[in-house]
Amino acid sequence: MANIKSAKKRILVSEKRAAKNKAVRSKVKTTIKKVEAAIAANDKAAAEAALKVAISELDKATKKGVYHKNTCARKVSRLTIAVNKIA
């Protein structure tokens, strides 16, 4: 354990940020799974609705600094392509 006050504070702040980031990542993963489930069920309408929510969550996560912008763009691109492939 740290002895210096500022080091103790950094540990607390780091834990708090890690918890927040984990919650945001979890939310993003859940929305992506909903899109993938709709794709697997061949339900284009549900997939498009879920995709809209997933893109929004990914953009929010990127804005908060949880994901790099290129990571977000790659995930959005792959999901969009998968949804568009549904007949």
Image (cartoon, rainbow, N blue to C red):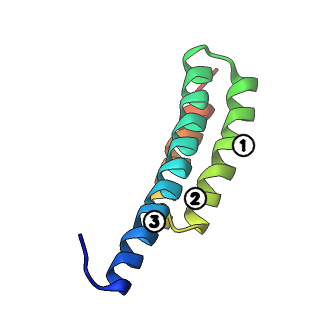
Sort mark 2 into few (<14), some (14-19) or many (20+) by Cα contacts within 10 Å.
many
Q: Where is residue 8 in the image (x, y as percent from the top left)?
A: 35, 76
Residue to which mark 1 is pinned: 52
Question: Quadrant of residue 37 in the image?
Answer: top right
Mark 2: secondary structure: helix
Q: Which of marks 3 and 2 is in front?
A: 2
Mark 1: secondary structure: helix
Say whether residue 11 is left or right of residue 85.
Answer: left
Sort mark 1 into few (<14), some (14-19) or many (20+) by Cα contacts within 10 Å.
some
For marks 1 and 2 on the same chain, the one whose residue lies earlier in the sequence: 1
Residue to which mark 2 is pinned: 61
Asked whether 38 or 63 is in front, the reply is: 63
Q: Which residue is drawn at 59% across and 53% down?
A: 58
Inter-mark Cα distance, 1 to 2:
14 Å
Inter-mark Cα distance, 3 to 1:
19 Å
Asked whether 75 or 60 is in front, the reply is: 60
**Which amino acid, mark 3?**
His
Question: Quadrant of residue 27 in the image?
Answer: top right
Residue to which mark 3 is pinned: 68
For marks 3 and 2 on the same chain, the one whose residue lies earlier in the sequence: 2
For marks 3 and 1 on the same chain, the one whose residue lies earlier in the sequence: 1
**Which amino acid, mark 1?**
Lys
Q: Quadrant of the N terminus?
A: bottom left
Q: Which residue is drawn at 48% across and 62% down?
A: 16
Mark 3: secondary structure: loop
